[in-house]
Image (spheres, rainbow, N blue to C red):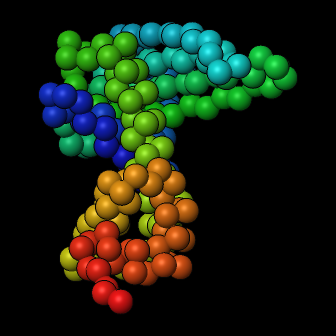
């Protein structure tokens, strides 16, 4: 699933996932084998805290502008994250790819890394809930307006539960399923005894 991160100017930064295999493959080829004349820019950050050392790097390229038919593509990027757990020495790493409609003048690698890091907060708070708690990717509802309606209902549910002070949506859903009167009270329906 490609996920959108919107910056303050309204421009898009998207992490490219498995449902866009050709785009992901094209981007992945740009960085180990840059085309002649491709001016790649880099940023690297190192942060220590919570018992770990995190190194992040982001590299940008304009090599696919004009080649890819992805709408509004101005740059592609590769983000790598390497984590060392200080106590155990255990290491973890991941690389993700993305696209943006922001030109290099609008967003240098440092700005893109900020946007991507902000995305993880959104991912953890919203997309993860949709993917795991609501198992949205396995939904068999695929025609007409029903997918949009179901997404709106999921968003409403998350908003109601967060507004009621619940931070663990899965736990809140289980609680509401066991206590339907409490769930109905969230939308203003209260039964009198």
Q: Is 147 drawn above or below residue 95 in the view shown?
A: below
Q: Nearer the viewer, residue 39 or 152?
A: 152
Q: Residue placed at 75% from the left, 22% from the top? A: 85
Q: Residue 105 vs residue 64: left or right?
A: left
| Residue 51 in the image, given as x and y percentages of width and height | 70, 19
Q: Residue placed at 48% from the left, 44% from the top? A: 124
Q: Is 67 drawn above or below residue 35 in the view shown?
A: below
Numbered marks: total: 0
Q: Residue 81 vs residue 135: left or right?
A: right
**Res. 73 in view:** no
Q: Residue farthest to the left?
A: 9
Q: Residue 124 vs residue 65: left or right?
A: right
Q: Is 58 drawn above or below residue 66 in the view shown?
A: above
Q: Quadrant of the C terminus?
A: bottom left
**Res. 148 in view:** yes
Q: Residue farthest to the right?
A: 88
Q: Nearer the viewer, residue 164 or 19?
A: 164
Q: Quadrant of residue 123?
A: top left
Q: Nearer the viewer, residue 177 or 86?
A: 177
| Residue 76 in the image, given as x and y percentages of width and height | 36, 28
């Amino acid at each position: 699933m490609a996920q959108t991160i919107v910056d303050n100017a309204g421009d898009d930064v998207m992490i490219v996932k498995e449902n866009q295999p050709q785009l992901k493959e094209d981007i992945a080829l740009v960085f180990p084998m840059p085309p002649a004349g491709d001016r790649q820019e880099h940023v690297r950050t190192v942060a220590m805290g919570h018992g770990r050392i995190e190194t992040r790097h982001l590299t940008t390229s304009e090599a696919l502008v004009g080649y890819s038919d992805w709408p509004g593509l101005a740059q592609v990027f590769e983000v790598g994250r390497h984590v060392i757990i200080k106590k155990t020495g255990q290491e973890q790493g991941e690389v993700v790819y993305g696209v943006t409609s922001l030109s290099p003048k609008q967003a240098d690698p440092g700005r893109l890394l900020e946007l991507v890091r902000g995305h993880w907060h959104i991912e953890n708070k919203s997309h993860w809930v949709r993917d795991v708690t609501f198992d949205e990717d396995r939904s068999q509802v695929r025609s007409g307006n029903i997918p949009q309606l179901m997404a709106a209902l999921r968003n409403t549910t998350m908003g109601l539960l967060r507004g009621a002070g619940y931070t663990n949506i899965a736990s809140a859903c289980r609680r509401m399923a066991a206590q339907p009167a409490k769930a109905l009270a969230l939308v203003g329906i209260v039964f009198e005894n």
